[in-house]
Image (tube, rainbow, N blue to C red):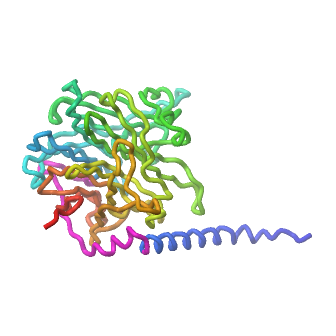
Amino acid sequence: MKKFKWSYLLVAPLVIFAFVLLSRARSEARFEAGPIGQLKQAAGDVRYAKLLPSGERLEGGLYDPSIAYAPDGSVGWLAYSSVTGDHKPIGEYVHTHLARTTNGGASWQFVKVLNPSTNSTLTLPDGKSLPGLWRYEVPTLLHDAADPDATRRWKLFVHCYFTLPNGRRMVPYGWIALRTAADPAGEWSTNAPLFGAGKSPPAPYNKTLVDVNALDASLKNIVAYSEPGAFAHDGRLYLSMTALKPRLGLGGIGVSHTIFLIGSDDHGKSWRFISTLLTPDDAKGLGCEFFDGSSLAEEDGRFFLFAAPMLRNKNEVHHGTAAFEFASLGEGQLKRDEKQQLVVAAYFAPQPGIFSGPGAGQATYDSRNTNGGLIMPQFNLKAYPEAFQIYQTGRRIVPKKS
C-alpha cells in the first residue's frame, strides 16, 4: 500500500486556485461572446450625464436610484442611497435620500433624508448584544393612485439590515421595510417591517408581516431578499425582488440570485406569488451568471423588467442594464423566442471610461422623465472617495421611430 504524500496537501490549494482563475477566465470569455456581451461591445463609447441634486452633500456618493412621477407628470421624485462615513475603503453608513425635479429631469434638488443610517446595538436571541449600525439600501418608490387611503398613496420599500463595525453584514438581521405618505415631501409613516425570509429575522426582530418563503415552494430555501422594484397598474401593486441562497462552487460558498414577481390586490396589505422571472439558467443563456437589481416600468403601454447582468470575478460585477418586455404583466411572463430564450428588448451599457469595481446597473425609468431618460448608477473608482454615482442616460427604453 502506497504511503500518502503529505505534499499533496500543499499542492491542492494551488490546484484549486488555478481552477478558480480558469473558471473566471472562461466565464468572462462566455460573457464577451454571449448576446449581452455583444450588445455591450456594440454600444461603444457611450456617455451619460451625471445626476447630482443641488443641495446634496457628497461623501462616498449616491447610488440605488428609484424614480416615480406624480400622476400629472408635473413633479418627479427620486429616492436613492447616500453613502457616508470614515470607514475604508467605503463609508459605513447608507441612508435613503429624496430629491425632486419639476422640469422632466433637467435638474434635481435635494429634499430630505428619509432613512438616516445610525449607530445602534443588535440584540441577539440569547439576550447578548453587538455594536454596529443599521443601513437602508436599494429603495424603490411608488405612487399608488388607486389606494383609497390618501395617506398611503406614496409607498417606499427599502432593504434594512444590520452591519458590524468591521463591515460584516448580519444577513439574518434584515428585512424589506415599507413607509407610506400622502406627499413625498411631507410626513412619512415609520418603517414597518414587511418582508422576511422564513425564520429571518430572528427574535426580537421577528415582526415582519409577510414570510416571503411561504408564498411559493420555490422560495422555501431562500435566506434573504433584496433589490425590490415596485410598480402599480390597474389597481394592483407589483414587486420584483432578488431571492438569495447559498451555493457551493470552486471559489467556495457563493450566493445564487433569482428574480421573481409578487403582487398585491389590496394596496400592500397582503401579497401573493406571481412568477419566477429570471433564473441562473436564463442568465447563462445570455452569457452571464445571474441577474440582479431589478425594476419595473411602462412605456407606450408596454411593460418592462430591468435587470443588471452579473459576473462573479473576485467580486460581483454588474454589466449595465438589460430590459425585457412582458408578454403578460399580470401573469409575470416575459417574452421569449421559439427556443424559450429570453428576448432582450433593450440594453444600456456602462460608460467605458469609468466602468470599475462592482460596475453599473440597477436602473430605474419613468417615461415622464423626458429630459433625463433612464437613470442608471455607475461605480467610478477614478472619482474615489465619491465612487458611487448616478447618471441619466437621456434614453427611452425603445427609441421612437423617425
Quadrant occupied by the C terminus: bottom left
Q: Residue at x 20, y 44 (%)?
A: 68
Q: Where does the image place residue 242, in percent across and percent down from the top left?
A: 42, 47
Q: Residue at x 28, y 57 (%)?
A: 388
Q: Residue 211: x and y, percent?
A: 47, 32
Q: Relative to residue 96, is residue 259 drawn left or right?
A: right
Q: Is residue 387 left or right of residue 367?
A: right
Extreme-top residue of the structure: 149
In this rendering, position of residue 31 left or right of residue 101 = right
User: 225 and 365: which one is in front?
Assistant: 365
Residue found at x 35% / y 37%: 119
Residue 312 in view of the camera: no
Where residue 389 appears, as percent x and y from the top left, is 25, 58
| Figure check: 117 above or below 388 | above
- Quadrant assignment, res 72: top left
Which image quarter is the N terminus in?
A: bottom right
Towards the viewer: 378 or 257: 257
Left or right: residue 247 versus residue 168 is: right
Residue 336 magenta-highlighted: no
Who is closer to the viewer here, 98 or 385?
Answer: 98
Q: Which residues are magenta?
A: 33-62
Answer whether residue 390 is visible to the viewer in this image: yes
Determine the residue located farthest toward the front in the rendered image.
338
Residue 401, quarter of the rendered image: bottom left
Whole-percent x, y for residue 89 in the image: 37, 57
Residue at left offset 27%, top offset 68%: 351
**68 or 401, nearer to the observer:** 401
